[in-house]
Image: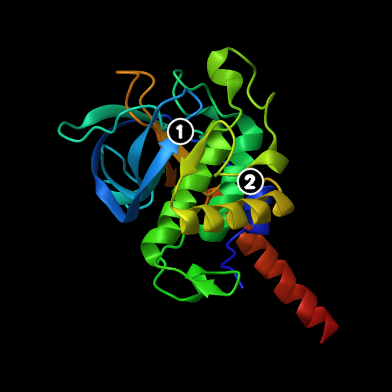
Amino acid sequence: MKKTTVSLLLCLFAAPLAMADLTVLYKGATPSLGVDVYSSDGHKGTVVAGQYRIEVGGATGDIIGAPGVIDAFCIDIDDWAPTSTARSYTLTTLDGAPDYTSGPMGSKRAGYLATLLNRYWDVGDWVSAESRTFSSVTYSQSKVAAAVQVAVWEIVDEFNTNKFGCEPDADIKPGDWNVTTGIFKIVGNTDVGKIANEMLSTVVGFGPSSLGNYAAVSNHATDSYYQDYVVRVPVPAAALLGMLGLSVAGLRLRKRLA
């Protein structure tokens, strides 16, 4: 049984993000694995796929764990990671990223991406066997983390003609997502491909989710060619208030029924 963190309350409440000026520096990736990829722009090569570590400066409570080194996933495969000098970034809504060189992913892609991360982004770094078991086979942490990243790229990059001027979501084809075929794809890494495709099949079955758990850090307002990342954000205050209200209502109902 896979970990599920989708919350009904987060589907009911969404607070707008305050735009914030940040700095981001890439600090490596772990767990991770090298994979050979083709992007929808025709770029190909061996890249690091897995859970990225980025150092975020300038943020307060807008991003979980910031300021400091936090976990993230890349949503901008065609751009570079800032590895030597921290670069200026902006905190933005998930559906408004990546930057303009890739075009915003739109609300549908972002909703499916949220479902993927709700189910498979493990805060314990996939230590438990349950978080690493797919079709009765238990894989390494590195393969599962790489599969999550590859699935992220498939959702954001596959059929994404928005980068060539189309409207966001106009070209989304969830039923055709497959990380081993298509415009975006990986070559080799058979286990990573199997895991990622199983993840994507489950995500398509569940459908899009609320974006309340996630945001993006984006470089489009400055240098325009550094990678954007999806990051975790705190539960909106409205959702917390709603949770408290529902708890109180539940207590009162139980008292009346007693």
Dot in front, 1 or 2: 1
Image quadrant in which you'd find residue 82: top left
- Residue for badge 1: 38
Q: Is residue 205 left or right of residue 228?
A: right
- Residue for badge 2: 210
Which mark, residue 55? none
Quick one: which residue is furthest to the top in this view? 165
Question: What residue do we see at 62% from left, 61% from top?
Answer: 243
- Whether residue 125 is visible here, answered yes or no, is no
Name the one closer to the observer, 158 or 93: 158
Question: What residue do we see at 58% from left, 20% from top?
Answer: 162
Residue 211 position in % (x across, y down): 58, 43
Residue 7 position in % (x across, y down): 63, 59
Question: What residue do we see at 55% from left, 57% from top?
Answer: 194
Badge 2 density bin: few <14, some 14–19, many ≥20, Cα 10 Å? many
Tell me the amino acid under the disc marked 2. Answer: Ser
Badge 1 density bin: few <14, some 14–19, many ≥20, Cα 10 Å? many
Which element is circle 1 on? strand
Label whose residue precedes the other's in the sequence (1 or 2): 1
Tell me the amino acid under the disc marked 1. Answer: Tyr
Quadrant of the snapshot with the C terminus: bottom right
Question: What residue do we see at 35% from left, 25% from top?
Answer: 219
Q: Is residue 72 left or right of residue 120?
A: left
Can you say whether 57 is above or below 140 in the image?
A: above
